[in-house]
Amino acid sequence: MEKKITQTCPICGGAKLIYYTTCKDSFTSGEEFDLYQCEKCQFLQTTNIPSKDDLGKYYQSDAYISHSNTKKGLINKVYHTVREYMLNRKANLVEEYSNIKNGALLDVGTGIGLFPKKMIEKQWDVEAIETSADARSFAKDNFNITLHDENYWSTLLPESKDVITLWHVLEHIPELNAIWDRFHTILKQKGTLIIAVPNCSSFDAQYYHKDWAAFDVPRHLWHFTPESMKQIAKKHKFQVVKELTMPFDGFYISMISEKNRDSSFSFIKGFWIGLKGWIKSWKRQSESSSIIYILKKID
Ligand SMILES: [Zn+2]
């Protein structure tokens, strides 16, 4: 019999969720978390997530900060080349889809500040919010960029930004509807919202199922598909105008997924599945491991 729980779906307001699968946190705690899907709209979410105060311990900010700056070894060289390519691509997307140069941008969940740094170099007026105090001090010490904590939201003026960006951040934010309301308030008329998230209807998500690394429980609370993204956008008066694939993510996610399975030759196997997913996404974007959604505020 299908296992069901009573819990409100943040997208459609449906009251019943159906059991989907159980995933393990392979990154920090080794704990297991259940994923449930809305009976009405199929939106997938992580359940029994730790409280907001406890969530912090599931993030190893030290590990990713030190990793971010070493350039030794082949893997780090590849990582830095890919990172630089992606930063340029993101910057170009902002200018192409907002049709603005040197506008006002808010980057949410900015990490150590690489993307703000890139946009400041392109003469944009940039503000950025980051919850990790370690990441904020890293940005200050290394790039002399001031990142703001969460309290900064309340100081942002209505209709003050041309573009808001979230690069792999929305899936981490507990108050999902509240953050969409903020996007709508703070963006100017016809402003551009750019959201990159993993895609749980992708080829690699289907293939790895509970071992899919981008479920990343309990850090990822929400698991989006192109359908659910369109739905939540509409609810908050946004329209998805473009979906773009992120070719590198599928390789990376597949390699970690193979590690989650304790596979031998996880690098080669992960590369192969990443390649298959990438080729499939040429024809159908909905097969892509991650998707960049370009949205416009519609009224
Ligand atoms: Zn729903």
Image (cartoon, grey):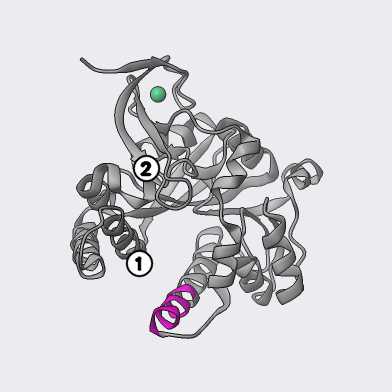
Residue at label 2?
A: 24
Quarter of the image that includes the C terminus: top right
Q: Quadrant of residue 17?
A: top left
Q: Position of residue 121 (x, y in %)?
A: 66, 77
Residue 111 drawn above or below residue 21: below
Of residues 123 and 9, the one nearer the viewer is 9
Indicate which disc, 1 or 2, sits on the residue closer to the N terminus.
Answer: 2
Q: Position of residue 40 (x, y in %)?
A: 34, 20
| Numbered marks: total | 2
Disc assigned to residue 248: 1
Q: Is residue 288 left or right of residue 170?
A: left
Report helix, strand or loop for mark 1: helix
Quarter of the image that includes the N terminus: top left
Q: Quadrant of residue 68?
A: bottom right
Q: Is residue 165 left or right of residue 150?
A: left
Residue at x 68% of width, y 50% of height: 131
Residue 53 lies in the magenta-colored region: no
Residue 81 lies in the magenta-colored region: yes
- What's the magenta bit mostly, secondary-structure-wise? helix
Q: Which residues are magenta?
A: 74-83
Q: CA distance from mark 1 to mark 2?
A: 24 Å
Residue at x 72% of width, y 61% of height: 136
